[in-house]
Image (cartoon, grey):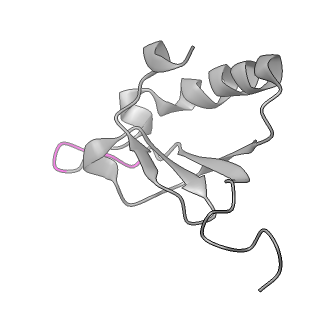
């Protein structure tokens, strides 16, 4: 194993779901405001010089808990955050 490849490796990316497929039976992240989150996060990351990239993604399969984000590689999910929760 190369250095930095282990489970304690710092996340390199934050995936942000912007899925707009929801309906009455299945909600979606975009329907809950996730499309505004990437730009707000990008401003905060740049201002704080945080070493992480942001990437929008179509689905993280957590629709009922969205907006959904995930630290990658293999990091935890961040669920239910709204634009108001982005400093």
The residue lying toward the viewer, choosing from 68 and 36, is 68
As drawn, is 13 to the left or to the right of 28?
A: right
Say which quadrant the C terminus sits in: top right
Q: Quadrant of the N terminus?
A: bottom right
Q: Is residue 87 left or right of residue 67?
A: right
Question: Is 40 or 20 nearer to us in this picture?
Answer: 40
Residue 84 vs residue 76, the one in the foreground = 76
Residue that appears at 32% across and 46% down: 22
Picture coordinates of residue 31, whole percent (x, y): 37, 33
| Vertical arrangement, residue 30 with respect to residue 62, above or below | above
Q: Position of residue 69 (x, y in %)?
A: 50, 45
Using the image, determine if residue 57 lies above or below residue 78: below
x%, y% of residue 10? 69, 54
**Which residue occupies 54% across, 54% down?**
58
Numbered range of the magenta stretch: 21-25
The answer to whether residue 27 shows anywhere in this view is no
Q: Is residue 84 left or right of residue 35?
A: left
**Numbered-mark total:** 0
* Residue 79: quarter of image: top left
Q: Is residue 84 magenta?
A: no
Image coordinates of residue 86 in percent, x first then y, are 53, 19
57 shown above or below 65 = below
Q: Main secondary structure of the magenta part?
A: loop
- In the displayed image of the protein, which residue is found farthest to the left? 25
Instruction: Give the residue displayed 32% in from the left and 50% down from the top.
Output: 63
Q: Quadrant of residue 50?
A: top right
For the question of whether residue 81 can be seen, the reply is yes
Q: Residue at x 74, y 74 (%)?
A: 5
């Amino acid at each position: 194993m190369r250095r930095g490849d282990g489970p304690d490796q710092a996340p390199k990316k934050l995936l942000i779901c912007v899925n707009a497929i929801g309906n009455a039976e299945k909600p979606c992240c975009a329907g809950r405001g996730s499309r505004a989150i990437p730009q707000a996060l990008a401003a905060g990351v740049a201002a704080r010089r945080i070493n992480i990239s942001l990437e929008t993604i179509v689905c993280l399969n957590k629709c009922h808990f969205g907006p959904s984000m995930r630290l990658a590689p293999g990091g935890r999910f961040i669920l239910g955050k709204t634009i108001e929760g982005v400093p």
